Image: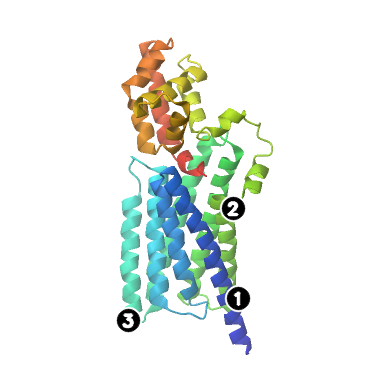
Amino acid sequence: MGEFAMEATIKMSVLLIVSILRLGVAVPLFNTARRNHLNNLYWLSAQFLCLVIALPFAAAGMLDFPWIFWTFLSLSEIALIMFVHATFYHGRKSRMPVFMTLAVLGLAGGLYGNAIHNFQLSAWLVYPNAILIWGWNFVEAYRAYGGIAQDASTERWVKSRYLLMMTYSLVDCGGAVLGTLLTTGVWVSNFGSIIVVLINFTSVTLQILTWVMPESFRLWLNREQQARPAQEEQRPLSVLDVFGAAMTAGTGLKSMACLYAIRSAAAKKIGSEDSAAVQKYLNQMTYTEWEAILQHAELRRILINSGADEASAAKAIENARQALVEKQSLLTLGAR
């Protein structure tokens, strides 16, 4: 076997390994989305699945089918846009329409480049979008992390998940920059192709740690976190803690009373006082369902019956609604 063939075989083997590993991220994400009713994780699972399909057909490997590579790379960009929008901007305006327009134009341009066998055109129209979108993902994860970095109620493994997402976003952004240079011919280098393969391997390793997160790794991240009482381990992670802290700010209310009010409002919502049923509902609540609970008249009534006046109850609920908007990504980043 010649040197060139050996190099191509090695790169192809790594590409296939990376695709298989990334499939090991896409499938658990799909299951987490279904288990926790998180529609945004379906988009993230789809993004990884598109990369699973695209990567083996990259020009760096032996299966060089450009139309498959560019099409599914563009589809992965579209899925990532939807994930970022649904995770960090639920119910709010974002730059999603701008990024989506660029991604759709890139998809069409990539297909056109394939049709006329101008793969450099495909690269110029698709790869820069990946740079922008991964950059957007980094910026939004960074902003969300800033909102909980000093929050003692948020477990460290959840904070670490933001940091890991930021890290692999930068890695993939760098991979897209290098891919642009190599595919367009700005930089012609076999060594550069090897770097791209290594970047993909680094990226998928970080994505496994982020989204699959082996239990031993999660416990290691939480090694300095004060242990919670056993009964609190069943709560929907730090979401209730966030609401409890927000509702007490400037209201004079006790966190315990606020959390009791939320649980009681949830019980009214499902028509059951059974603690296990209420807990199951809380664990599975989506952003929309949390929003409905915080708008429920029963929550205000329970707070007032617990000793709050009208003004304090109204402020506590408004604080909780604001916290839901600002820290909505915790519903995703705290899901297992």
| Residue 305 in view in this figure | yes
Q: Do callouts 2 and 3 mark residues in contact (Cβ within 8 Å)? A: no
Q: Earlier in the sequence, mark 2 or mark 3?
A: 3
Q: Earlier in the sequence, mark 2 or mark 1?
A: 1
Instruction: Tell me the number on the disc at residue 253.
Output: none
SS assignment at label 1 = helix
Residue 170 placement (x, y as % from top left): 53, 56
Kind of residue at disc 2: Leu
Instruction: Tell me the number on the disc at residue 209.
Output: 2
| Residue shown at 48% from the left, 17% from the top | 257
Q: Nearer the viewer, residue 112 or 21?
A: 21
Q: Which residue is mark 1?
A: 191
Residue 186 shown left or right of residue 288 in the figure: right
Where 112 sits versus 20, above or below?
A: below
| Residue shown at 44% from the left, 33% from the top | 282
Where 235 sits versus 122, above or below?
A: above
